[in-house]
Amino acid sequence: MVAIPTIVATAAGFFGSGSPGQPGVCDLSNTAIPLSPVQQTALGSPTTPLAAVGLAFGVQNYTCSARNVFVAAGAVAELFDISYLASTNSGLLSSVQNDLFNFWNSSDAGSTTVQQLVETLPNIVPAYMILAQHYFIRNTAGGISPTWDFRATQKFQGVENAVFVGKSLANIPDVDPTKNVPWLHVGKVSGDISNEIYRIFTVGGVAPSSCDSGASTKDISVKYTSQYWFYGGSLGLGSK
């Protein structure tokens, strides 16, 4: 297994500086989400100001159904703050997730898990780099809901409502849907950190087309990276 600091150093090289949590929060007031008019129409336009942009790397989880096809079973990911790249309209913004995925999916990453990274990162990286954790929780309807949790970060540590529990409002396929999970517009169900989230520039995360429901192991995790754009919220996510 590669040393976890090596993964962090590789990721950190993409981010730049000036992220929320550092002195001098970057200005996102003139930053527009990089969607084509067709994509924006399909996903819907944001109704609140942009607050932060995160780069995620993690896994999409699946379980094998009785029909011998994989069905989604949530995700786990770590988000780093790339608001600075977004605010400067850096050319890296459209490719940073590809570079990180190439490393995350390479043999250099070995058997390092997202859970190991989440547990270790606070001890080895500047606090301002860590934006949030992404996972799923059980909902009252018996299903699962996507959650973005900011409560372990420096700025929102211990703030009870610094979470976003959401539901999908719209989705569009990636340009390579056989390899990359869809792009999403997610609306808020609960929490105060954000009002809406867009998942764009996805890389990886798609399960194989079939599985064996009789196999001893029915669950798989597929590595992915993506960007998450956070809008609105009442806790000052994008403020100093």
Image: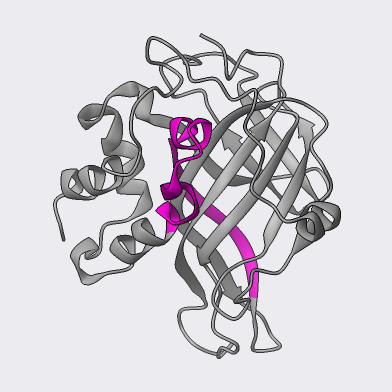
User: Image check: 79 left or right of 213?
Assistant: left
Where residue 223 appears, as percent x and y from the top left, is 43, 65
Q: Is residue 74 magenta?
A: yes
On screen, 69 above or below 108?
Answer: below
* Front one among 20 and 112: 20
On screen, 63 above or below 198?
Answer: below
Q: Quadrant of residue 111?
A: bottom left
Q: Number of numbered discs present? A: 0
Q: Quadrant of residue 42?
A: bottom right
Instruction: Kindly identify the residue that appears in the image at 34 percent across and 27 percent down.
Output: 17
**Quadrant assignment for the N terminus:** bottom left
Instruction: Kindly identify the residue that appears in the image at 75 percent across and 64 percent down.
Output: 172
On screen, 169 above or below 133?
Answer: below
Where residue 132 appears, as percent x and y from the top left, is 49, 33
Instruction: Kindly identify the residue that appears in the image at 21 percent across and 71 percent down.
Output: 107
What range of the chain is rendered magenta? 71-97
Where residue 208 appears, as percent x and y from the top left, is 54, 84
Where residue 78 appears, as percent x and y from the top left, is 43, 43
